[in-house]
Amino acid sequence: MLQRYSYYTGQPLNKSIYTTDSIDTKDVGEIPLGKYIELDLVTLCVDIRASTIRSAKESLTDSISMLNVFFSTVARVLRDSDAIIDKYPGDGVMAHFAMKRYGAERAVKAACIIKRLVEEHINEKLQEQSLKTIKCGVSIDAPGSGTALACVGIEEHREIIAVGNSVNVAAKMEKAAKNRVVIGNDVYRRLPGHLSRHCSPVDIGIVYDSTGEPYPGYEVDWLAVTESR
């Protein structure tokens, strides 16, 4: 992971740590309007903290400059991690990973790389431009049932969106993430031991609709993950 992290800070990388292909983006782009494909996806949400308050206090130029620095780095990490970037909802990013291709592991590794880059690389670039530093939270969840990628809109303007429980829960978990990486139980139980040992139970403030019982969540020690080999 240290080698992987160094790639985004300008140092050379000889080989990707990921050896599996992702969802075929060509197939996704060819979904007909009004149709969908069912997939088991892992959903990741990244959000800049306190950005609304920040944007009210700084110039439009500064806000856009900050977002460009943030998005350009985060999007590169996600694409290199074989994710499908769904959308950029204002001050964040939503992306999806194919579960059958080690999606939980790849999503957690990508989240930890993003967190470390924000803390050590993105904020450094912001300071070089005399911009305020940022904090971000990352939430990840996987469905208990299938998720769909659907083509919606009109012929002149269509988009591929993800619909399903993992999308809804990951979006809700985003608020609980604060300045952390948090994951749902369905992600945690799919992680290999070298990653799950860096996870600790945490209250994410979500309950099961059917039972009212708390939905298990875990905080990931992103620094420990990125320093592991």
Image: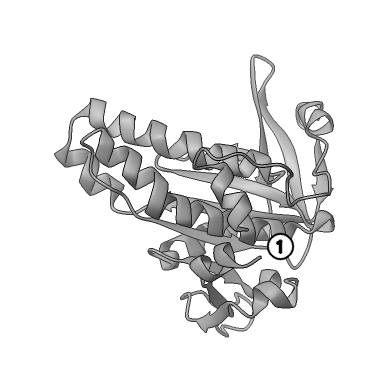
- Residue at 61% across, 71% down: 184
Horizontal and vertical percent for residue 154?
66, 21
Q: How is the image coloured?
A: one colour
Query: Is residue 6 visible in the rendered structure shown here?
Result: yes
Taking the image as shown, residue 98 lies to the left or right of residue 91, namely right
SS type, badge 1: helix
Near-viewer residue (61 or 161): 61
Taking the image as shown, residue 53 lies to the left or right of residue 178, namely left
Amino acid type of the residue that numbered disc 1 sits on in the rendered structure:
Glu
Query: Is residue 169 visible in the rendered structure shown here?
Result: no
- Residue at 76% across, 50% down: 18
> Disc 1 marks which residue?
105
- Residue at 62% across, 61% down: 108
Horizontal and vertical percent for residue 9?
49, 42
Q: Image height check: is 190 above or below 3?
A: below
Horizontal and vertical percent for residue 139?
53, 61
